[in-house]
Amino acid sequence: MSAMLLEVEQLSKSFGGIQAVQNVSFYVKKEDIVAVIGPNGAGKTTLFNMISGIVPPTSGFVRFQGAIVSGKQPHELAMLGMTRTFQNLQLFADMTVLENVMVGFHSRLKSGIVSAGFRLPRTVKEEKQAQEQAFFCLEQVGLAHLAWERAGTLPYGMQRLVEIARAAVSRPSLILLDEPMAGLNPQESKQLVDVLLMMREQGFSFLFVEHDMETVMAIADRIVVLDYGKKIAEGAPEEIARHPDVIKAYLGEEAV
Ligand SMILES: Nc1ncnc2c1ncn2[C@@H]1O[C@H](COP(=O)(O)OP(=O)(O)OP(=O)(O)O)[C@@H](O)[C@H]1O
């Protein structure tokens, strides 16, 4: 597959005197899994926040499916087919698992979650569609049997899967995952890796920030490495693992 999905061009962000991200460029193609790694403070979160519309870039731009999208809000990006998850779980603990996933569907609907509350005819139909689609996504992540449980009662690893199902329910072309493995035990991590690989088979593409190198090496097609706000390397996992600048960035940090 060679269709270009996301193009990040010379993206920069400064906070006062701090250059958090400096002229970073890379791309994600359809059905790619691309990881962004780097030592603490390298600029990963800032880069991610710019791509997903949370913070505006100081300069540079983001193109998604051929159109420039920098400056658009997260809900506008969701309508165009780009969704994201956050480092800290953002589920509604008192809502059911199914309802939590449906929230992701509403982010892409015309009627939205507010009018859904009024139960207008069009929205009743959309509700049914949302419910079916949400249930389907829960089946895919292996949680359909828990659809009616309150989300807050699920173990952490399962809540992460609910978040992934929510990000996927509107059938976006690209899902951004912010440290998907954080807080998961090895068994939960393995389960999530399997889910992500299975979703890729179904046509999803992923860009993710991750500290867990084992996961990065296991699932990334390409890795973008940041250090002090700059891209210092980009390539396949095996190239990155032996890249001298990457080794220096990591070992230099740990040796201190
Ligand atoms: N809102 C902000 N105001 C000022 N400085 C910021 C802000 N956000 C980030 N920074 C600075 O920008 C730099 C990059 O931070 P960022 O959080 O993007 O790095 P990171 O790679 O995600 O780090 P970590 O792995 O620790 O999450 C750091 O020096 C940080 O202190």
Image (cartoon, helix red, strand yellow):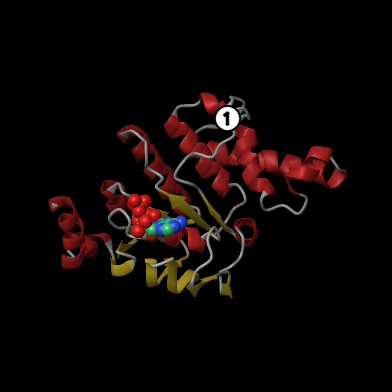
Quadrant occupied by the N terminus: bottom left
Give the answer, above or below, for where 81 lies relative to 27: above
Is 99 left or right of 91, judged from the image as shown?
A: right
* Residue picked out by circle 1: 93
Q: Image quadrant of ligand 1?
A: bottom left
To which quarter of the image does residue 72 belong?
A: bottom right
> From the viewer's perspective, is residue 167 above or below residue 51?
above
Please tell me whether residue 251 is drawn above or below residue 92 in the rendered image.
below
Q: Position of residue 109 (x, y in %)?
A: 72, 52
Q: Residue at x 44, y 72 (%)?
A: 11
From the viewer's side, name the closer residue of 13 and 39: 13
Tell me what residue is drawn at x 49 percent, y 39 percent: 89
Q: Residues within 10 Å of mark 1 (few under 14, many from 20)?
A: some
Observer able to see residue 35? no
Residue 204 coordinates in the image, percent (x, y): 50, 55
Question: Which residue sits furthest left?
Answer: 255
Q: Toward which corner of the image does residue 124 lie, by quadrant?
A: top right
Residue 152, located in which quarter of the rendered image?
top right
Rendered residue at 43%/47% (across/down): 196
- The answer to whether one can see residue 82 in this image is yes
Whether the residue carrying mark 1 lies under 8 Å from ligand 1 is answered with no
Three-letter residue code for mark 1 = Ala
Across and down, in percent, residue 90 comes to: 54, 40
Q: Position of residue 88 (x, y in %)?
A: 46, 41
Residue sitting at the far front: 16
Q: Secondary structure at mark 1?
A: loop
